Amino acid sequence: MGNIQTFYQNAKANDFARDFQFRIVALGPFSESDLVYLTTATLPGKSISNQPVPYMGLEFNIPGSVKYDGSAAWQVVFRCDEGLNIHTKMENWIKTIFDDQTSTGNYNTPREISSMDLLDKDFNATRRYNFIGMYPVTLGVINYDIKGTGTPLEFPCTFAYQYYRLV
């Protein structure tokens, strides 16, 4: 049984994860020089499908296949740069998937690999999530307001991916 000293020693040794300790390393058409201002993201979920098997009046549970929870709608929020370069690159990425002017696009199974690093308190990567087959699903709106206070603008995006791997 632990006490407050044990808790404190563990807290000092292991520290706590902080909500700002992440970095997007690779995302579609973006490079490191683009300085992608991603303000919020979530870690992906994963679950095993339960398969009930009845036998002699009992129901046994056995593990089935894996599901990547939220893989159809992974939501993030970008901070806007003044020239809307990030927003424009997102619009162009979506246009490569489906161009509404020509009704053409890339209908192949996505192969794009995007990566997110988790960081320690010294901003060293401690874990990387590689999202396989990622592509944008929605590009959210940017809200302007003439009565605004000068707050930096943000816009949401939703991505889909096939699965992820820890590196």
Image (cartoon, grey):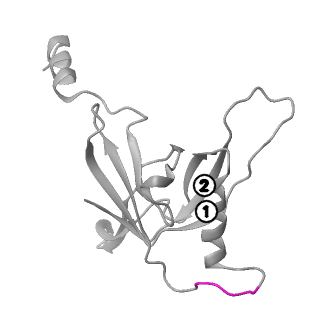
- Dot 2 crowding, Cα within 10 Å, few <14, some 14–19, many 20+: many
Q: Nearer the viewer, residue 72 or 91?
A: 91
Q: What span is in magenta? A: 102-106
What is the three-letter code of the residue carrying label 1? Lys
**Position of residue 151 measured from the top left corner of the image (x, y, whole percent):** 69, 30
> Going 46% across and 47% down the picture, which residue do you hit?
42
Q: Is residue 104 magenta?
A: yes
Q: Nearer the viewer, residue 150 or 14?
A: 150
**Position of residue 8 measured from the top left corner of the image (x, y, whole percent):** 20, 16
**Position of residue 111 measured from the top left corner of the image (x, y, whole percent):** 43, 77
Q: Are marks 2 and 1 in contact (CB under 8 Å)?
A: yes
Distance in Å between CA atoms under marks 2 and 1: 5 Å
What is the three-letter code of the residue carrying label 2? Ile
Q: Secondary structure at mark 2?
A: helix
- The image quadrant of residue 55 is bottom left
Q: Which residue is mark 2?
A: 86
- Dot 1 crowding, Cα within 10 Å, few <14, some 14–19, many 20+: some
Residue 122 versus residue 126 in the image, above or below: above
> Going 43% across and 35% down the picture, which residue do you hit?
20
Q: Secondary structure at mark 1?
A: helix
- The image quadrant of residue 61 is bottom left
User: How many dots with numbers?
Assistant: 2
Q: Which mark is residue 89?
A: 1
Q: Main secondary structure of the magenta part?
A: loop
